[in-house]
Amino acid sequence: MSSLAANRKINTEMKIGAAICSVYLVWALGWFVYQYLIAGSITEPYYPSYDITQELLPLGGKYVLGTDIYGRSIFEVLSSGLIYSLVVALTVSLSCAAIGIVMGYFSVTAHSSIAVLLDLTINLIFVFPSILIAILIMSVSGQSFTGLVFALIITGWPGYARIARGETMRVMGLSYVEASKAIGVGKVRLFIKTVLPAILPLLLIHIVLGISGVIISESSLGFLGLGGSEYSWGSMLAVAKTVLLEAPHMVVILSLAMAGLIIGLNLLGDGLRDYLDPQNKD
């Protein structure tokens, strides 16, 4: 495939992913304004109300997407869950990236004993399935937003650290970096001025792809009853499966909403990865 054709495919992939993510972002922003500024306030935000007399209404009518087993509008519950998932995913991904960059850099430049200790910590976390570590932490800390974020950060930062370590080793071996070290440039300045700008593009791709992974992990914990909110999409799926035969549209709508966001993020991340690959440049 020619370079021009490859770039055309890359741009299309990025555009599709960006368009899908933009739809979800506009949806989340619109619901945030409605929740905190129109129907509620900053101190008393609006949340979907319970009405047992309206439970399991079908599609259409007063409630476009129907209602759940508590009589809440499925659209409103989905909207609240979208904001919750995005806040968790962004918080966890950015925190993991920050920790991973610092740990990856120090694993290369620090004293050998510290580097060995960091590598051992990263490998120990990778030995055990991340979902099991998250379940253990959530079972101890309890069901809360803070506990969920902490559990996902503990299991997520080693992946960023490995990428940062590999890129740091590559950058530190370049001639201009060796020259900077030779003239006495400090480690902190070298990190901020040279290493960080060089590894950020690859980390940006991993952050975008990591957001979708965090959403899946958060939903999995919510489905197991260890979520930090009743509006977690995983928690809603757990409730929806109990009435799968009576109201199958609940599972279908929730699954499609989650799948659309994951697909959009993955397309955007893959497009960015190919776009930033120097081998695909003219």
Image: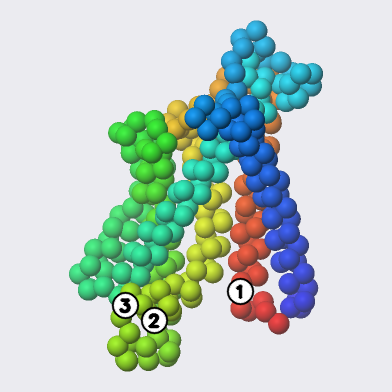
Name the residue beneath numbered marker 2. 172
Quarter of the figure that contains the N terminus: bottom right
Mark 1 or mark 2, which is nearer the start of the sequence? 2
Q: Which of marks 3 and 1 is in front?
A: 3
Report the amino acid beneath label 3.
Lys
Q: In the rendered image, which residue does mark 3 sit on?
A: 187
Callout 1 amino acid: Asp
Viewer-nearest of labels 3 and 2? 3
Can residue 37 be seen in this snapshot?
Answer: yes
Residue 209 on image: x %, y %: 56, 55
Residue in the image at 47% along x and 52% along y: 93
In the rendered structure, the answer to whether residue 80 lies left or right of residue 221 reads right
Structural distance between the alpha carbons of marks 2 and 1? 20 Å
The residues bearing labels 3 and 2 have C-alpha atoms spaced at a distance of: 11 Å
Q: Name the residue under label 1.
A: 277
Residue at 37% in and 38% down: 147
Q: Earlier in the sequence, mark 3 or mark 2?
A: 2
